[in-house]
Amino acid sequence: MKYLDLPTFCIRGSGLVDLEEHTTNLGDDLRKKELKDSLEKDRELIADLQVRLYAEGKHSLLLLFQAMDAAGKDSCIRHVMSGVNPQGCHVTSFKAPSSEELAHDYLWRHAKAIPARGMIGIHNRSHYEEVLVVKVHPEYLAGQRIPSLDPNHLSEGFWEDRYRSIREFEGHLARQGVTIMKFFLHMGKEAQKERFLERIDDPKKQWKFSTADVKERGHWEAYQRAYSEAIGATAAPHAPWFIVPADDQWESRAIVGRLVREQLESMDPQMPTLSDKELEGLKLGKQQLEKE
């Protein structure tokens, strides 16, 4: 099935990225059951690999999710990671920065949420908001109180500096044993409209909708440019982007599940090997318990 052609979704090198060249819908007419069965198999393997990653305690996995509103980030995270032991996995959802966060540099709150060794960390939105929503709305920079910065007169060099800071940040993480995967759930404008209307009409989903969502939709083209530029400027072998079709949520879930499973398999985490002394301790403990 085409959705398993994983290399087509991956961007590993910097350069121009045109999102119009990347589909939002595979159009394979895959049955929902096929996609769910594929995800279920991968989810079971992810759960087993996560136990080994946690026990080994040497490496960590950081999954970043970015998307336009209603693309399905929350549900994708929930469906792909539902079998993982919460003890070894942590999800951080980044909203508008607080006053404390604005008092620091923009990477500060994201650095605090980097997963420890043995952990899987999931960032629902990420430091990329600083070159996405802030690029579309540069007026937000006023709240960051950056010395000698006028949000009304930004040079292209300002954004290049931010891309460079992000590349250096991710390079540093990779050198410390953090494996990074960055997912852009690529949804079409018509699909977003349909999901907004569904939220409005469904009493169980109305709480998800805000009139601000429609207002932000008016900046669709600006966001598409911002995503194209950010992906092209920050993709790297150690921090690849994956542009995942998201018009069909079961397609995106199945793709992300397979990508995460294969990444964990390539990391090949191993259960710790006990020393002779530790093995002797197990033997002694067993003997003592059997005597009770």
Image (cartoon, rainbow, N blue to C red):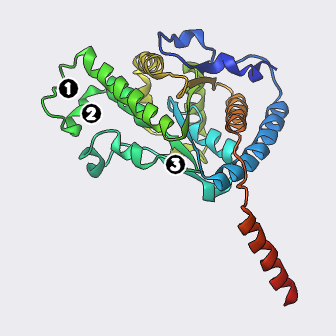
**Circle 1 sits in a helix, a strand or a loop, which is it?**
loop
How far apart, in angstroms, are the residues tagged by discs 2 and 3? 28 Å
Q: Which residue is mark 2?
A: 140
User: Which quadrant holds the N terminus?
Assistant: top right
**Residues tagged 2 and 1 counted as in contact (Cβ below 8 A):** yes
Residue nearest the observer in this picture, 216 or 103:
103
Residue nearest the observer in this picture, 289 or 209:
289
Nearer-N-terminus badge (2/1): 2
**Residues tagged 2 and 3 counted as in contact (Cβ below 8 A):** no
Tell me which corner region of the image, top left, top right, bottom left or bottom right, holds residue 253.
top right
**Circle 3 sits in a helix, a strand or a loop, which is it?**
loop
- In the figure, 199 relative to 17: above or below? below
Residue in the image at 50% along x and 12% along y: 17
Under mark 2, the amino acid is Tyr
Q: Which residue is mark 3?
A: 115
Q: Is residue 150 left or right of residue 237?
A: left
Q: Which residue is mark 1?
A: 151
Under mark 1, the amino acid is Pro
Nearer to us of marks 1 and 3 is 3
